[in-house]
Amino acid sequence: MRAFIVAAALFAAAPAFAQAPATSAVLADAARAPAGRTIIDGANWRCEGATCTATGGANQPASRACRRVAARFGAVSAFTYKGTALTNEEIAACNA
């Protein structure tokens, strides 16, 4: 019975893990996209063309996360951090 309760609890929690907010970046220059995975502040980044997505990572302000990605991958034209998209003004500051 105990195993059933544990399994039920894990099953109920699964949708929360599956729907984690996305972190993504669109690079201004797709040629700067790294091959394979790159880890930045604990986030596992993978790029396909100019679009890069990440899982995991440290909790930090979205603007800092964007600056760290831009420093490694080059300028970004769009950035979403854990489900929150940066504005055009925030993107400009990220790339500065």
Image (tube, grey):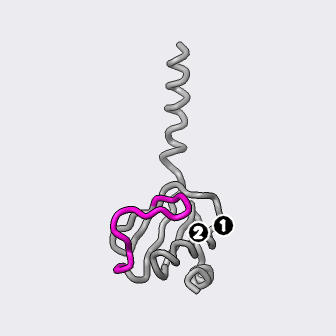
Query: Residue lying farthest top?
Result: 1
Residue 15 position within the rendered picture, expressed as x and y whole percent measured from the top left: 50, 42
Q: Is residue 42 on the magenta stretch?
A: yes
SS of the residue under disc 2: helix
Residue placed under numbered mark 1 in the picture? 61
Real-space CA distance between mark 1 and mark 2, rounded to the nearest whole angstrom: 6 Å
What residue do we see at 51% from left, 64% from top?
A: 40
Depth order, front residue of 8/70: 70
Residue at position x 38%, y 67% in the image: 47
Few, some or many residues within 10 Å of mark 1 (<14, 14–19, 20+):
few
Q: Residues within 10 Å of mark 2 (few under 14, many from 20)?
A: many
Q: Contact (CB < 8 A) between labels 1 and 2?
A: yes
- Is residue 89 shown in magenta? no
Residue 9: x and y, percent?
55, 29
Q: Amino acid at mark 2?
A: Ala
Q: Which residue is mark 2?
A: 65
Residue 53 horizontal side relative to residue 48, left or right: right
Left or right placement of residue 82 versus residue 24 in this view:
right
Q: Which residues are magenta?
A: 30-44
Q: Residue furthest right?
A: 61
Q: Point out residue 59 in the picture as x, y percentages from the top left corner.
A: 63, 58
Mark 1: which secondary structure?
loop
- Residue 35 sits in quarter: bottom left
Quarter that holds the C terminus:
bottom right
